[in-house]
Image (tube, helix red, strand yellow):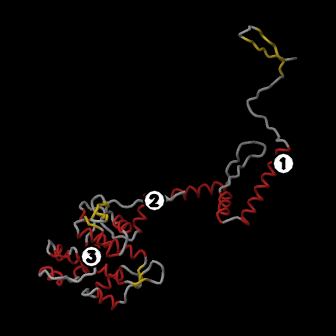
Amino acid sequence: MKHYIGLFDPVSGQLQMVEAKKMVIRGSVRAQQAPQEDMQSRKLAQTTMNLKADLGQTFGTKKAKKALAAITENAISPRKAQGGDAPQALDASDKALMATIKDVTMSVATKEDLQNAMDAAKPVPRGNYEAEEIQDVYRPEQLIGKDILELIQVNDWAGAVRNNEDIQLRSRFVAHRINRIGSGESAVLRLRVLRYLYFLVLLYLTSKKGRDRGTKEVLKKDKLTEELAPAPPPVVEHIRRRFSDGGIMRKQHIDLLATHCCVFACILDNFETNTWDLKEDLGLDQKQMTQYFMEIGATIKKVKAEGRQDCIARLKLPLVFPKLRQMRR
């Protein structure tokens, strides 16, 4: 029995019969053994890959070894049932592994959790972020402590302001504001906050370079008491303990001191301050000073001044804090 295919040409109207081989079409692919040559080539390719991996582990760079380790860790071995193409069912160990992965995945912190954890770990003053008025977010009585604040003496400053006398100061920020603050409303309280800020500046300026990189050594207690005069011993000890660890100021202590200065500067300047004077007092560049103000929730506006560019830091609700940065892949 022979089979033919008819080819009809609609232009000429002719029909041509061509003999065709018998073909059977099935609904599923019949299993077929791969040729021996293909199997050998696959084995050779696999052997070559293994040799390259061994050479890479032995003589490769750190980057190459890391890449090979990632390939090995992420390799997926498809498990096929014997005599068929359907995958095997998960056994008890596989199910236990999948359950563990599920539990770990469910406990992974969200971006919001990471943001909250990052904010809590930052060396910045703690404020009342639920406050409805900006003056209630950072309160000097809470940041400094009511008892410590009341121990700060400002009679000499108040008398000098009242008598229009000169005051020898080592801070541009304090010198440019002491007359206005000393003659304004709530002068005693605001002068105490100003003097506390001045103590922080003096602590920073009198500290020496530490042995470890990025650290500073605070003066001995007797020397520090002389520098912070007329601060009583409890105030000196309070400042020394809060902004150093055993007389050593590390990065977190320096950041904490700088951000406290930023908060007090905003409070004393009615929540809108020029960062220039404080930047000069602490010997920081404008970028670092701006970052410290941003860490307390302030917004920054650049303005042109005589021969320079100033930055105005403003505290207003809602506070705007730096966001968690996504790591580059």
Q: Residues within 10 Å of mark 1 (few under 14, many from 20)?
A: few
Three-letter amino acid code of the residue under disc 3: Arg
Residue 204, located in which quarter of the rendered image? Answer: bottom left
List the residue tagged with mark 2: 325
x, y (%) of residue 141?
25, 74
Circle 1 — which element? Answer: helix
The answer to whether residue 28 is above or below residue 236 is above
Label 3 to label 2, Cα distance in Å? 35 Å
Circle 3 — which element? Answer: helix
Extreme residue in the right direction:
1
Compared across the picture, whether 284 is left or right of 108 comes to left
Compared across the picture, whether 183 is left or right of 322 comes to left
Residue placed most toward the observer, 99 or 9 = 9
Q: Residues within 10 Å of mark 3 (few under 14, many from 20)?
A: some
Three-letter amino acid code of the residue under disc 2: Arg
Sequence order check, earlier mark of 2 and 1: 1
List the residue tagged with mark 1: 40
Which residue is drawn at the image coordinates 30% and 85% (left, top)? 236
Extreme residue in the front direction:
307
Label 2 to label 1, Cα distance in Å? 51 Å
x, y (%) of residue 301?
30, 60
Which residue is drawn at the image coordinates 72% and 49% (left, top)? 79
Label 3 vs label 2, nearer the camera:
3
Q: Residues within 10 Å of mark 2 (few under 14, many from 20)?
A: few
x, y (%) of residue 50?
76, 58
User: Which label number is shown at residue 172?
Assistant: 3
Circle 2 — which element? Answer: loop
Extreme residue in the left direction:
163
Compared across the picture, whether 320 is left or right of 272 comes to right
Residue placed most toward the observer, 103 or 154 = 154
Three-letter amino acid code of the residue under disc 1: Gln
Residue placed most toward the observer, 291 or 132 = 291
